[in-house]
Image (cartoon, rainbow, N blue to C red):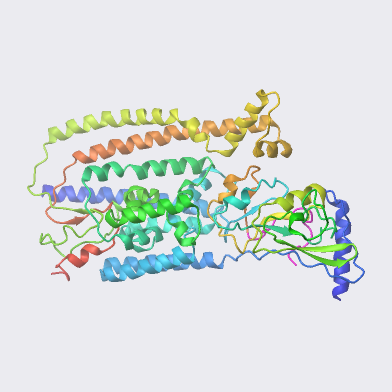
Amino acid sequence: MDEQKRIKRREFLNKGIRLSIGAGLGVIGVGLITRSASGKAIWQLDPSKCVQCGNCATNCVLQTSAVKCVHVTTMCGYCDLCSGYLRQGAKELNTAAENRLCPTNAIVRTFVEEPYFEYKIVEELCNGCGKCVKNCGSFGNGSLQLQIQQELCLNCNQCAIARACPSQAFSRTDLDTPYLLKGFDELDIGG
Amino acid sequence: MKKGATYFILVLVISLFTLNIYAQRFPAPEFENNHKIPPTQISKAQPAILEYLDIVVFFGVMSLITWVILKKRSRRMVFWISIFSLLYFGFYRKGCICPVGSLQNITMAIFDPHYVIPVTAILFFITPLAFTLLFGRTFCAGVCPLGAIQDLVALRPVSLKPWIRYLLGIIPFIYLGLAVLFAATGTDFIICRYDPFVGFFRHNGTSLMFSIGGILLVTGIFIARPYCRFFCPYGVLLNLVSRVSRRHLTIANGKCINCRLCENSCPFDAIDKPTGLEVKNDNRELVKKLIIYGFITPVLIALTGWTVSRYHGDFAQVNFKVRLAQEVMELKNIESPASLPEEVTAFQSSGTPEEALYKEAQSIIRDFHTGSWIMGGFIGLVLGLTLARLTIYRYRNEYLANKGNCYSCARCIEYCPVKKGD
């Protein structure tokens, strides 16, 4: 009899705790859902904050970073003397290896017409080091910009590059603004 | 038509250049050979369809495994469901987002009103807890990919001494406390940072990730599910919730006959043995113990709270803003620094006044101070209750699954001869 009483008491207690935990979960769930985002959060970096420190190349959880150089073709000057393509102090203006800036040879230069050249990023080769971005921004139009290529990004809950970014250029954004290319926000760069 | 469009874009670009704050040094050319400007190469963001599918699959697998454990009582089916979860949530969905990590999103959302939390994170956090509240830790049994991968390698499990289990069992509480502290202050998601198996799921990761994961898997051959038992911070919540669960897996499908066949069947030491002789609790003794622990626990709370709060400065060092403020302050005292760190130059060029940074850093450090007091107190409470629990004697005359520690993996069911309501 005494034992039964004790079991009943325990069950009653458990039920009370259970109900309060359930209520707590409900409050958290409803409270947060009212100000949640549908879909998912994705990461992107703001090129206007980016200082091209090179951390993007080394800190991504992927072996080859999901951050790539993006060439905003509408901003490019199509220069012969491209500061993003050629190393500073290059002896000759040609495609010889010793004259190029990109360490992975990820920029392809093709002749268009005198005196213009077109530049293209080979995404598979680009490691997101930002050397070309730095030079293009310093001496050119700034049409080369670092961005997370969303197709490659794994969307980690906490981006490992964001943690290492010295200028805190990374932020969570949503699917409406997957790219934050600077310069021409009004223009549909997507193409 | 296309030519017109190109021309239009060019005109638009040129007009925009005048508005552009970024100096345009070299105007875009007007090609004479009608060369078309190629599109900017950016890949489409992956739509959220997979995330919604995740929720559906997650709900489905949770319901299925709960039904299998409680109604079908089949270890084999639990095993295959865990393989599916490992392949889907682990290797296909790359282990992100998982309920274990989502507790940080929830914490951050509670403390930072500007953080917009995705619905998936909320549902991934709530669903396993709700299921556990009703049916026990069926999530751990075979939905969690981290648990599934460890369950696979648990080939030669050894039984651990209770004192080792109690001692190591405190680690998850500390881990949970730290994770909440760092997420609440918006500093870092340490659970994700030190996720042991996500590197395997992605076939990609740092050597640290692989070495932690590798060590855990090798250890896991002998000490079953080491991460779940001695590290998993979400497991702490599930453990506590599971203790008051409405229903739970039972070893025997009926009355236990004390045949001892299941005694060594649990790789996680989560089966409570019969206590033998029933000892009547001496009420006076109980009251005495109650008074002792009623005194010890608050002292422990105050002590650990104070101890941990001593280190709040070190915890705050993890925060980027705090580090930055310190660097900026230190560099001010040096006449002509040889070279400025990257983050300092980036901060200086951003044009934010130093005072604003100092103020923000100070408020973060204050948060860490309060937070580390609370976290320390929490650990003290855990220590106190762990001690108190050791003295509680509860009479048992049958083999029972420990509702808190049991992962509902259903191994013990196979060993039990009491099959159908005998």
Tell me where the magenta segment starts and ends, as one range: A175-191
Q: Is residue A7 above or below residue B248?
A: above
Check if residue A177 falls in the magenta segment: yes
In the image, A142 versus A29, the foreground residue is A142
Q: Nearer the viewer, residue A96 or B385?
A: A96
Q: Can you name the residue that lies furthest to the bottom here?
A: B1
Q: Where does the C terminus of chain A fall, quadrant-wise?
A: bottom right
Residue farthest along the right direction in this orientation: B32
Q: Is residue B343 left or right of residue B184?
A: right
Q: Position of residue B276 (x, y in %)?
A: 8, 49
Q: Which residue is drawn at the image coordinates 57% and 32% (left, top)?
A: B363
Tell me the quarter of the picture where residue B44 sits: bottom right
| Above or below, comparing residue B305 to residue B228 in the picture | above
Residue B223 coordinates in the image, percent (x, y)? 28, 53
Front one among B416 and A83:
A83
Q: Residue at x 22, y 30 (%)?
A: B291
- Residue B252 visible in rendering: yes
The answer to whether residue A28 of the structure is visible from this angle is: no
* Residue B241 highlighted magenta (yes or no): no
Numbered-mark total = 0
Describe residue B48's horizontal placement relative to residue A117 as left or right: left
**Residue at coordinates 48% horizontally, 62% vertically from top-left?**
B203
Residue B408 location (% of width, % of height) = 28, 60
Q: Main secondary structure of the magenta part?
A: loop
Where's residue B76, x and y in %?
28, 71
Q: Looking at the picture, does residue B270 appear above or below residue B393?
A: below
